[in-house]
Structure formats: C-alpha cells, structure tokens
Amino acid sequence: MGEVRSTGRLALTLGSLGLAAGTLLIILSRQWLPAAPSPPPAQDADDARAAPRIPARDSRPPQPARRIAEHLIAPPPLDAAGIERLEPRPPLGELGLASPPKTPMPQDWRETLLYRPTATSSATFEAMGRTVAISGTIDIDPSRICHFGDASWPCGQRARAAFHAWLRGRALKCFLPPDAERFAVAASCKLGNQDVGAWLVSNGWAMASPPGIYGKAESVARSAEMGIFGPPQ
C-alpha cells in the first residue's frame, strides 16, 4: 500500500516538472524567436477606387485603320483646263503697298551747301549759280490761278512766296553732281534736318510726282485743304 502511494506521488511530481518545463519553453520562444509580421491594414473603399488600375496588356496584334466613306472624304479630281487665274485684289489701304525702291545715288554726287537760295517757283530755287528743282515734287507755276468754292486766287504766286519766306536766305544741303552749275538738276535737299520736298507737299505748296515718296503727304494736304487745295491765302 505504501508503494502505491509513493508511485502516485512520483508521477505527480514528474507531471508538475513537465508542465513547468513546457511553460518555460513557451516563455523562451516568445523572447528569442522573431515576431510574426502584422497583416496590412484594410484598404478603404475610397482609396481602392482612387488607386490607378494598370490595364492588362493586350496581346492581340494592332488592327489597321478602317476606311470610311472614301468617296465622300477624298478630294475630287481637278481638270487643269478648267482652272481660271484671277488678278489679285487691290490692297485695303496704303499700308499694304510696298514702298518704291530708292534710286541709288551716283557715286560722284556729293552733299553740297548752297547759300542764300532764292525761290523761282514753289519747288525750284537758284543759289550760287545753280538751278535746283526739289526731286519728288511738281511745282506750281507762278501764273497758276486756283479756285476754291466761288473764290479764285493766284495760288502760284502765293506758293512761291511761301517757299521763299521759308528759306529766308538760309543754306540748303543738296546732293548734286559736280557739274550741276551747267544745267538745272533735280535733287533732294534739306534745310537743317527738315526734308524740303516733304515740307512743300505736306503744306500744299507743291504736288507729289507719281510714283514718289510724297503721295501720302499730298493726300493729307488735300484732306486738310492746305495750300493750293484750300481757300485764298
């Protein structure tokens, strides 16, 4: 009877030692073994919709473009014999016109100072034995009579007087050939920095020679009724 009790106690003791050893093994495994990765957070439904979806790659070969209604889209054949060439329309204004090319100045012409010029007409003067007509202009004959409304007045004499008063015995710079004293010559001249031809035409004391560079100045003078295009002065 005593042996049975001793065997029971021994079995109970060994069972307790086994339980303790199992508990110790579990504790040690939690401390030394790596922790299992935590599962990813659940994705929200809105984030799932916002995330771009990569379409699956289509493995089918590309299909050629399908032609639709070629008889409506393709240009009709043209007969060259039925094409008529029309003249270009006129420009809408003077800005669309190309400026006339400038005539090259001869190499032997030089800028010459002419002192004490005297007007012989509205666009011609004499100075230092030379007679010079302002190039690009048409002078007004001193005997010309102009009419404005019911009035008539000697516009030729008035134009020459206006040119003479503007000169006032000062010097003009003109491009002249070396032998200009032998004959009258048309030349461009300046009084200081003022172009003489531009002043005469823009004030209505001379007309622009076509196709010259003073055509627009004459149009302005006519519209403003200046000089010979206006009332008696």
Image (cartoon, helix red, strand yellow):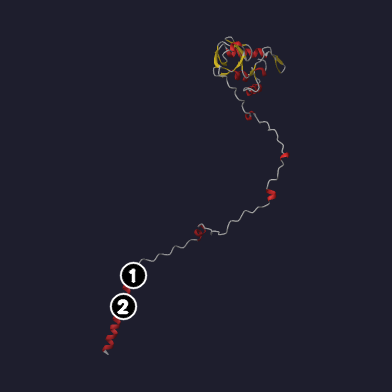
Determine whether the residue tagged by mark 2 lies in a helix, strand or loop: helix
Q: Residue at x 30, y 79 (%)?
A: 16
Picture quadrant where residue 32 is located: bottom left
List x then y, in percent, for residue 146.
Answer: 69, 16
Q: Residue at x 31, y 75 (%)?
A: 21
Residue that sits furthest to the bottom in the current view = 1
The amino acid type, in three-letter code, at marker 1 is Ser
Residue 207's label in the rendered image is none
List x then y, in percent, for residue 97.
Answer: 63, 29
Q: Residue at x 28, y 87 (%)?
A: 5
Residue that sits furthest to the left in the current view = 2
Is 127 located above or below residue 203 in the figure?
above
Picture quadrant where residue 104 is located: top right
Picture quadrant where residue 30 is located: bottom left
The mark that comes first in sequence, 2 or 1, is 2
Near-viewer residue (88 or 9): 88
Residue that sits furthest to the right in the current view = 82
Looking at the rendered image, the quarter that the C terminus falls into is top right
Is 19 located above or below residue 56 in the figure?
below
Q: What residue did someone put label 2 on?
A: 18
List x then y, in percent, for residue 221.
Answer: 64, 21
- Mark 2 crowd level (few <14, some 14–19, many ≥20, 10 Å Cα): few
Residue that sits furthest to the top in the current view = 129
List x then y, in percent, for residue 34.
Answer: 36, 66
* Lateral position of residue 63 relative to residue 145, left or right: left
- Counting labels gives 2
Determine whether the residue tagged by mark 1 lies in a helix, strand or loop: helix
The amino acid type, in three-letter code, at marker 2 is Gly
Residue 29's label in the rendered image is 1
